[in-house]
Image (spheres, rainbow, N blue to C red):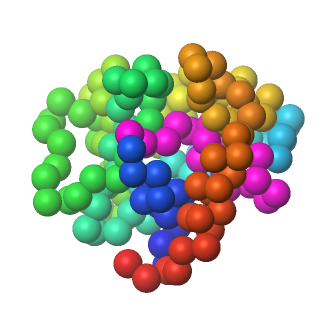
């Protein structure tokens, strides 16, 4: 079964999706505001853990700062090519396979745990997530647009075939 966050990345083929976008998209109903900091942190940790452990062998997830948005974005890449050793690697809990790679501008190479990435991303986007500002447009985080809602709806309508 394909995780919903991966369906979202596949639906949005441009440059990747931000952490706040993914968090808000995975809530029911879409874009629900959760003001409890601990609940949100647990939610983000679960998402990052899923990326680490549930990415198909045919892919890897790469987190980098987007040239267009100047924000960290997650993107799916083919596992045919793997990032160089310059990137932080977040290996799976079981074994040393790695499907989650992070640019050094976000996380230093010495860090290799979901908790390290959680701290780095929460510092950047925690307040936006708490405020329900999930979409990055015109240089700021804001609520979802109709186009965002359509992308999320299209992803939720995908089948679970790979």
Q: Is residue 142 left or right of residue 46?
A: right
- Residue 119 visible in the picture: no
Q: Position of residue 52 (x, y in %)?
A: 42, 54
Residue drawn at the location 76% of the way across and 53% of the way down: 30
Q: Which of 96/77 is in front?
A: 77
Looking at the image, residue 51 lies above or below residue 162 = above
Residue 128, given in percent of the width and then of the height, sits at: 70, 27
- The percent position of residue 27, horizontal first and vertical second, equals 74, 54
Q: How many marks?
A: 0
The boundaries of the magenta stretch are 15-31
* Residue depicted at 34% across the width and 68% down the height: 56
Q: Is residue 55 visible?
A: yes
In this picture, residue 72 sits left or right of residue 118: left
Residue 160 is left or right of residue 112, and the answer is: right
Above or below for 27 versus 70? below
Q: Eyeballing the image, is 13 above or below 134?
A: below
- Percent of width and height locating residue 140: 63, 19
Q: Tell me the quadrant of the picture where the C terminus can be found.
A: bottom left
**Residue 17 lies in the magenta-colored region:** yes
Residue beneath the point at 57% across and 17% down: 139
> What residue lies at 71% left-to-right and 40% top-to-bottom?
144
Viewer-nearest residue: 141 or 61? 141
Query: Does the magenta portion include 95?
Result: no
From the viewer's side, name the closer residue of 64 and 39.
64
- Please tell me in which quadrant of the rendered image residue 57 appears: bottom left
């Amino acid at each position: 079964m394909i995780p919903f966050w991966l369906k979202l990345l596949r639906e949005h083929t441009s440059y990747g999706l931000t952490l706040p976008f993914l968090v808000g998209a995975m809530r029911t109903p879409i874009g629900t505001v959760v003001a409890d900091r601990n609940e949100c942190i647990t939610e983000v940790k679960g998402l990052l853990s899923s990326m680490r452990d549930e990415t198909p062998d045919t892919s890897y997830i790469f987190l980098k700062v987007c040239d267009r948005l100047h924000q960290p974005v997650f993107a799916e890449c083919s596992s045919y090519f793997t990032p160089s050793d310059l990137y932080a690697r977040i290996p799976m809990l079981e074994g040393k396979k790695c499907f989650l790679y992070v640019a050094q501008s976000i996380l230093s190479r010495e860090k290799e745990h979901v908790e390290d990435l959680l701290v780095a991303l929460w510092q950047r986007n925690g307040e936006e997530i708490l405020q329900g500002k999930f979409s990055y447009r015109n240089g700021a985080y804001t609520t979802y647009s109709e186009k965002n809602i359509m992308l999320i709806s299209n992803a939720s309508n995908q089948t679970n075939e790979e």
